[in-house]
Image (cartoon, grey):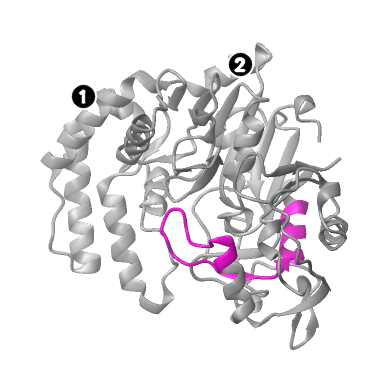
Amino acid sequence: MDCSSLGHTCVVGLHWGDEGKGKIVDLLSEHFDIVVRFNGGGNAGHTVVIAGERFALHLLPVGVLSPGRMAVIGPGVALDAGRLFEEIDALARRGIVVGDNLRVSDRAHLVMPWHKKQDVLSEQALGDDRIGTTARGIGPCYADKMQRATAVRVIDLLKPAELPARIARICELKNRIFAAAYGDAEPLDAGAVTAEYLALAERIRRHVCDTTRLFAESIAAGRRLLFEGANGMLLDIDHGTFPYVTSSTTSAIGVPAGAGVPSQTVRTVIGVTKAYTTRVGAGPFPSELRDETGQYIRDRGHEYGTTTGRPRRCGWFDAVAARYSVSFGGITAVAVMHLDTLTGLQRVGICTGYRVRDGLLPGFVTDCSLLEQAEPVLEFLPGWDADISAARRVADLPPAARNYLDRLEELLGVPVTIVSVGPDRSQTLMRP
């Protein structure tokens, strides 16, 4: 793939998140001027390894790791301002300064203490029916965004004369709701919340701007934008496995609204997937492996959540789900990650269909009750034993690994242009 010829580009995940989007965004950043987060919040976890050094980002766009690039948090992000500065301070301790290279939309909605509290209380109340959130307050923040009267935006931080009264009013309302709905007796302290956010306001002020105008001016000036998706497409609020989804639009469909650019801006959409499939939390997963092979993949792939540390559920590559994401997401190219994780397996499986009691399903469905009943139709290909982590060209891969990539490409119907054989930036192969 010729990265230098890419127009405005979006990177998204084809399954349920954790696909390795951060590495691809980092790899591509040198070819772009601005890297933009347009959805999600601190529930995302993008991991990048540069020269053996590991960086885990949750809110900061990966572009902050590339000198000379501007990183932007768009209006569609649920912003936890405290966590944002924790990340900035952590990078500073490692010699990476985040300053004028970061811009934050004045329209982004803030994750507030009551959002995190509601997330925890709601999950506890649901018991066995809980969604399996990260308890970062993302869903409640987006809910208040739609409620409007109980929302706080970044621009509100820049109005210190008005902010205390706003926070006090919302805290009073939330305390009444929590007491009535959950029997919670620990009230929110409006004074403490106000003091915390007035302090955060002073830190964030230098980064805040009208990012919609920034993008319009940048596009007119010929600057290239790279949009960094959070979570995976099967977690999309409208098109994913509802209710076991996140609370934002996770595909490139979300870029125009979540960033504030015209719908025709993005011309290249790179879908990222592992060479197998993983999922965190509750929800259907037809190709899941609950055996030694699943544990083998988990251990070799270090499949534990960047944000939560929870062990990920692992299974064979789900081509049915990925093909669905390719179709509705307008995917133009695919990046296959963690190919090296499958090394050592005598055979590797691909889920090519779903079987239920009445026969084969016509394709992927978002009806969770139906997906829970589905049994995977599996196709197996020969595995490989050779260590592929040192490969630097696709031609260096064993024939069985190349055949596996060819089969994935055939099933997805779009070219596999990037292949990852290890966590480091250098362990990435470009496929013509």
Q: Quadrant of residue 8?
A: top right
Dot 1 surroundings within 10 Å: few (below 14), some, or many (20 or more)? some
The quadrant of the rendering that contains the N terminus is: top right
Residue 40 in magenta? no
- Find disc 2 in the rendering and name its residue: 218
Q: What element does badge 2 sit on?
A: helix
Residue at far top of view: 221
- Find disc 1 in the rendering and name its residue: 160
Q: Quadrant of residue 25?
A: top right
* Nearest-to-viewer mark from 1 and 2: 2
Q: Amino acid at mark 1?
A: Pro
- Left or right, residue 175 beside residue 6: left
Residue 133 appears at what percent x and percent y?
A: 42, 61
Q: Is residue 72 above or below residue 359?
A: above
| Residue located 50% across and 35% down the image | 61
Residue range of the region highlighted in magenta in the rendering: 299-327
Q: What element does badge 1 sit on?
A: loop
In front of the other: 407 or 341:
341
